[in-house]
């Protein structure tokens, strides 16, 4: 790639200030240099481009015809540099980030890991906002989000982190006794707990398992996966997870996976923010940390490996 053919930056700075302020003296005061230094820089610029930018027959810093053409472009370039610099420059509000996240993910995965973020960035505060019935990112209330993304949205930056799978979960007690769950058909004898904003989850899994005519529970429906999982812990029925956020409870013996069958979830977990906010240091800092945590989690890698195998077999 060829080297940029740019005039000296210090000379451009002097020219922009003198042209904007209409005075070599005022430009010198703004830049903290002498008037003669401003004049010297402008002469260096004129020498570099081979054209006079100021008229020499007046005491004021009056632009020549060429200068009048050149100045707007230089002013716009400086304005853009200033705007983008201020945008990415750390500010007072860069020490606090509000993250929209589902309560299930917050409790079962994110919160146990946040100590590491706090250790790395002790001066930064993270606020978790979980009171959302709408799955979509609300940029009016949060700086960024860690959510299931259904579709691309204009003006949003979306970074896929990992896929998700559907898998039933229940109390280990439901796997023993006369009414034990042994095959997907046995689900007809148990309550299917569901999240009322995602009732199709169960139908997707049941279709994949080849089970028909199974109804969701009319009495128990929840606004989050974590609540349906807790009801499953109490033996109230069988819940649907969007894994691997039940793995710890399964390992602890509070829950059990009755079947090996996992079905790809229709959405993926992504880090989301507004395109206009993407370059803010606090956004980039948290996104980088979050991606590192995802990469280090063997359970999440296992989910993605499962999805890759299922896609390859399809």
Image (cartoon, helix red, strand yellow):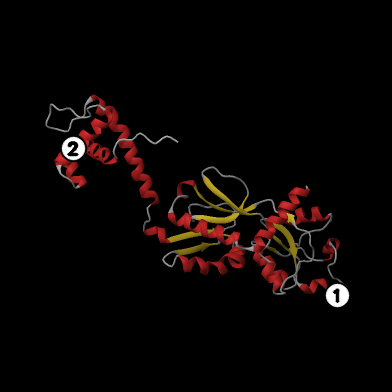
Q: CA distance from mark 2 to mark 1?
A: 94 Å
Q: Residue at x 27, y 38 (%)?
A: 12
Left or right for 222, reference 99: right
Left or right for 291, reference 53: right
Residue extending furthest toward the right: 178
Q: Quadrant of residue 74?
A: top left
Check disc 1 and report its element: helix, strand or loop.
Answer: loop
Q: Quadrant of residue 132?
A: bottom right
Check disc 2 and report its element: helix, strand or loop.
Answer: helix
- Residue 199, can we see it? no
Marking on residue 1: none
- Residue 147, can we see it? yes
**Could you classify mark 1 by the number of other residues whose Cα lies within 10 Å: few (under 14), some (14-19), or many (20 or more)?**
few
Left or right for 10, reference 35: right
Marking on residue 177: 1
**Residue 98 in the image, given as x and y percentages of width and height:** 48, 59
Q: Residue at x 72, y 58 (%)?
A: 166
**Residue 108 in the image, given as x and y percentages of width and height:** 62, 67
- 98 relative to 173, above or below: above
Q: Nearer the viewer, residue 242 or 129?
A: 242
Q: Earlier in the sequence, mark 2 or mark 1?
A: 2
- 37 relative to 147, above or below: above
Q: Residue at x 22, y 35 (%)?
A: 44
**Residue 119 in the image, given as x and y percentages of width and height:** 47, 69
Count of numbered labels shown in the rendering: 2
Marking on residue 40: 2
Q: Residue at x 24, y 26 (%)?
A: 51
Q: Nearer the viewer, mark 2 or mark 1?
A: 2
Left or right for 122, reference 311: left
């Amino acid at each position: 790639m060829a080297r940029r053919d740019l005039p000296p930056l210090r000379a451009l700075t002097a020219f922009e200030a003198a042209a904007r302020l209409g005075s070599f003296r005022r430009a010198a005061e703004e830049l903290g240099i002498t008037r003669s230094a401003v004049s010297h820089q402008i002469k260096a610029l004129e020498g570099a481009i081979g054209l006079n930018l100021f008229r020499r027959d007046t005491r004021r810093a009056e632009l020549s015809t060429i200068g009048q053409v050149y100045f707007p472009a230089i002013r716009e370039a400086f304005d853009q540099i200033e705007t983008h610099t201020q945008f990415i420059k750390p500010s007072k509000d860069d020490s606090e980030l509000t993250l929209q996240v589902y309560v299930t993910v917050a409790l079962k995965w994110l919160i146990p890991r946040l100590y590491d973020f706090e250790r790395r960035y002790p001066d930064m505060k993270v606020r978790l906002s979980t009171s959302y019935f709408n799955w979509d990112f609300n940029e009016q209330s949060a700086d960024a989000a860690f959510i299931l993304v259904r579709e691309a949205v204009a003006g949003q930056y979306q970074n896929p982190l990992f896929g998700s799978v559907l898998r039933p979960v229940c109390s280990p007690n439901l796997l023993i006794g006369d009414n034990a769950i042994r095959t997907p058909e046995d689900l007809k004898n148990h309550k299917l707990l569901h999240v009322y904003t995602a009732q199709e989850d169960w139908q997707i899994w049941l279709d994949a398992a080849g089970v028909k005519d199974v109804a969701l529970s009319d009495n128990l429906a929840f606004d989050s996966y974590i609540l349906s999982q807790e009801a499953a812990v109490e033996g109230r029925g069988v819940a649907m997870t969007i894994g691997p956020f039940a793995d710890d409870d399964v390992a602890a013996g509070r829950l059990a996976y009755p079947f090996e069958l996992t079905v790809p979830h229709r959405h993926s977990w992504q880090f989301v923010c507004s395109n206009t906010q993407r370059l803010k240091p606090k956004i980039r800092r948290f996104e980088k940390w979050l991606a590192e945590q995802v990469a280090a989690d063997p359970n999440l890698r296992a989910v993605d490996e499962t999805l890759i195998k299922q896609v390859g077999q399809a």
